[in-house]
Image (cartoon, rainbow, N blue to C red):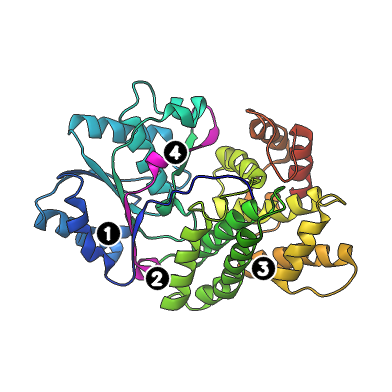
Amino acid sequence: MLDFKYMVSTKIFFGRNSIEYLGEELKRYGTRILFVYGQGSIKKTGLYDSVTDIFMKNNIIFHELSGVQPNPRISHVRQGIKLCREHDIECIVAVGGGSVIDSAKTIAAGFYHDGDPWDLFVIGDSSIKKALPLGTILTFAGTGSEMNGNAVITNEETVEKLAIHHDALRPRFSILDPTYTFSVPKNQTAAGTVDIFSHILEQYFSPTTDAFVQNRMAESLLKTCIEYGPLVLAEPANYEARAQLMWTSSLALNGILGYGRLSDWATHGIEHAVSAVYDVTHGVGLAILTPYWMQYVFDEETKGKFVEYARNVWGIKGTNEDVVAKKGMEKTREFFSCLGMPKTLREVGIKENALESMAVKTVLHGAVGKFKKLEKHDVLTILKNAF
């Protein structure tokens, strides 16, 4: 196991009616709030009224930034920073899924940055020194952004999608009420389940061989996705299924699985290049690419990990390790298919002549992957296989 520093600092309020803690919690951070949310679904569900009622009852002055899109844009972040500075904002409340929370995180960091907020992504994590306090109310299980210091933003001008990480971006608190995810459409629920699954795989497939406890935790979370993903599609208002996926989403990417070992993140890097150009739903892109990544990186050196995955997660029996490993890969593809995910990039409208530029964008800042290092030609081969 590698050395590490442990910090999972977000306070979690989990369960039905946990929004009741919002007013008291906000008093710790100030009375001038930027309220960030998406494209209107929280108004349809009544959550908007619940949040604003709490603001008013607690004498909180709030300014709204609505309209955050999936694959959130840096242009919207700039609007949020402008609002924060104009109104001397003390705290940000983000109500939504990962796109809303990632936008809010970038606004929180950009508030203290002298230049353009995109600089934070180009220069890197070291450019972040401070951020406004952030609280979140989660309405979508998938990204894990409610409990980590990660943010992914798209620059529509340069057609790039990049990530930053800093502990200053971790939400101070997050409200996780599974009932808020009951109304999430099936296709989005499925994509979120894939995203959770992929976050776990990116840390599970690691070159660090001595990570027994992390591996066993990861396998349990993968099995939770396998158990409850299909169930929640069949029964959208099943509280236990929604709760299991919501908590798995948080645990998958709050750092606990990655501490003490190297993580891969090659598939995410490739998908970011794909969705930056074509605006593909992140989980859909991951569902397409992951099986092809598995097939490409499988060799004598990596075989042992694939066998471990097949046996411990999927229960594959047998003595022929090649057969066992490949059955595990096929089970992964079958799981994504049972969630309604497409199998090829062609199915989501991607053109073959764009694959080269996607491969270039993937490795623009260097080779990707720790489990197996991927250069441009490797990425292009995976994209062509997935096409």
Please report the residue visible at 52 percent of the width from the left and 73 percent of the height from the top. Answer: 233
- Residue range (magenta): 156-182
Q: How far apart are marks 2 and 1 (CA)?
A: 15 Å
- SS category of the residue bearing label 3: helix
- In the shown orientation, is residue 64 left or right of residue 334? left
Judge depth for marks 2 and 4 and give the one in front.
4
| Viewer can see residue 341 | no
Q: How far apart are marks 2 and 4 (CA)?
A: 31 Å
**Which picture quadrant has residue 105?**
top left
Name the residue carrying label 2.
182
Mark 3 in CB contact with mark 2 (< 8 angstroms): no
Name the residue carrying label 3.
335
- The disc label shown at residue 355, or none: none
Q: Distance between the residues labelled 3 and 2?
A: 22 Å
Mark 2 in CB contact with mark 1 (< 8 angstroms): no
Mark 1 or mark 3: name the one nearer the start of the chain. Answer: 1
